[in-house]
Image (tube, rainbow, N blue to C red):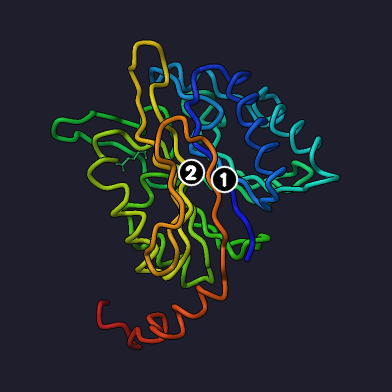
Amino acid sequence: MVLAAVGQMRSTASLRANGEFAAQLIKRAALKGAKALFLPEASDYIAKSAAETVELAKAVEDSPFMAAIRKALAAVAESTPIYVSVGVHEPCDGGQRVKNTLLWLDPQGMIVHMYQKIHLFDVDVANGPILRESRSVEPGKTVLPPFESPIGQIGSGICYDIRFPEHGQYLRSQGAQILLYPSAFTVSTGKAHWHLLSRARAVDNQCYVINAAQAGKHDAEGTRESYGHAIVVDPWGTVVAEAQTESDDLIFAEIDLEKLAGVRMKMPLEDQRPEPSPYK
Ligand SMILES: O=C(O)CCC(=O)C(=O)O
């Protein structure tokens, strides 16, 4: 069993302040003995408008947010090394839009894996928000194969990707044991679907699901507000850790790959898919 830490943030438009907060989470998670810390989508900043989202984007090497993360990793590297998954924005499209990216950093702060969000949140929800993420974000085009980590094989998605079961299923077919959906869910869609989707992806793929979350109001006017409830679900669909309030900013879960193997052995879904597929 290996300990994972999952963070909840209330990122604002200040990359510096968000970096300082993330740095504290890294130090606290490392001190507790976690081997990996998972931070939410858009940890570096959450802006009020599409235009501001594009304006604030910084290349990883120029980002004060990333500088703070790397400094914190360096501070703990010798005594309690820890890996970090973190959602950031990167400039692209000649400055017209940004990438919504998940980075996986080793304890030295080097980027080992980088995934760009594929499915963008362009929706008009009844009694909920009208959002057009594609105004400011360029969609990614590739699902990446899972990567090795101290807690198991990780497959990456971001937020809205969780609503596309084929994304998780593909990652599972490529060997994923853990699915990540770092998120900034809206309050209304979170209330309706967050737990359902987190548990569904865990059950249909027999994977751990680790969903770090943005929580609370991101600016003084409350223009953007996120649902929170950072969560870890085991491969049987049981919630093994969940942030209970907005200020519950760091939760921990033991990742048990023997438990995962047991679930898959007793109900071997992956081996029970007929060949040739009846769905094509
Ligand atoms: O799927 C949802 O309800 C929320 C998705 C979202 O907020 C996002 O992808 O940024």
Locate residue 9, reporting x and y percent. 50, 31
Label 2 Cα crowd, 10 Å radius (few <14 / some 14-19 / many 20+): many
User: Which of these two is toward me, 146 or 38?
Assistant: 38
Q: Determine the residue located farthest toward the right in the rendered image.
A: 78
Locate residue 277, reporting x and y percent. 31, 82
Q: Is residue 248 left or right of residue 225?
A: right
Above or below for 173 versus 112: below
Instruction: Give, as a three-letter code, the residue at label 1.
Output: Phe
Secondary structure of residue under mark 2:
loop
Indicate the quadrant of ligand 1 in the picture: top left
Q: In which quarter of the image is residue 164?
A: bottom left
| Image quarter in which the N terminus is found | bottom right
Above or below for 165 versus 161: below
Q: Name the residue under label 2.
A: 212
Above or below for 50 versus 165: above
Q: For the residues marked 1 and 2, what is the alpha-carbon distance in whole angstroms?
A: 6 Å
Secondary structure of residue under mark 1:
strand
Task: State the residue at coordinates (31%, 54%).
Answer: 197
Task: State the residue at coordinates (55%, 43%).
Answer: 102
